[in-house]
Image (cartoon, rainbow, N blue to C red):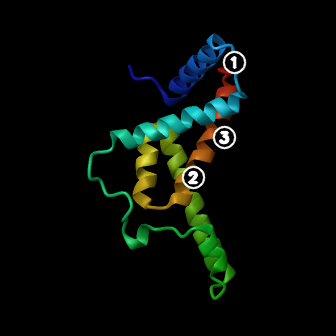
Amino acid sequence: MEKTELELIKERIQVKKEQLAQQGLSAPEEKELVAETIDERMEDSLKEMPPGMDVVKPDAEMKVPFPSQIVSQTDKDDESTDSVIEEANIKLSELVGIAMEESIPKAVTMALKSGNAFLIDKLRDSLVDKYYQELKNKKLI
């Protein structure tokens, strides 16, 4: 039976704490350990990608602009800007859902296909918050 992401993260945090204790170092805050573990899981997804997979040249309609591009587009009305931000938030929510239900590597792969670095960065931040809260709620940390 495969382990869930939550179990993998919990185990990895425990290993990190043990390694730090063996070295006589104090462990950082648990949220920082969760962030390190999420980073490792995201990096793992890059290793699992098939060689030659095109992740930086998505279809034009799949690209979501960076927030700075959204703000700088003064010729567009507020509704258009709100729509782009809402679309990015919806995509981010979908990716977080995929990470929680299936796996972090799958969500990261999908985010990479978007070609949007902002979305990938926000995914990391959202996953750290979500998994940290989930671990606390289940009293795993």
Q: Is residue 106 left or right of residue 24?
A: left
Hey, which quadrant is residue 13 in on the image? top right
> Considering the numbered disc 2 on the image, is that residue within a helix, a strand or a loop?
helix
Which quarter of the rendering shows the C terminus?
Answer: top right
Q: Which is more foreground, mark 1 or mark 3? A: 1
> Considering the numbered disc 1 on the image, is that residue within a helix, a strand or a loop?
loop
Image position, residue 6 (x, y; %) = 55, 28
Q: CA distance from mark 1 to mark 3?
A: 25 Å
Disc marking residue 129: 3
Disc marking residue 25: 1
Q: Amino acid at mark 2?
A: Asp
- In front here: 37 or 111? 37
Q: Which is more foreground, mark 2 or mark 1? A: 1
Q: Residue at x 59, y 52 (%)?
A: 122
Q: CA distance from mark 2 to mark 1?
A: 29 Å
Image position, residue 38 (x, y; %) = 55, 36
Residue hosting label 2: 121
Question: Furthest residue to the bottom?
Answer: 75
Q: Residue at x 63, y 71 (%)?
A: 68
The answer to whether the residues at label 2 and label 1 have Cβ atoms under 8 Å apart is no
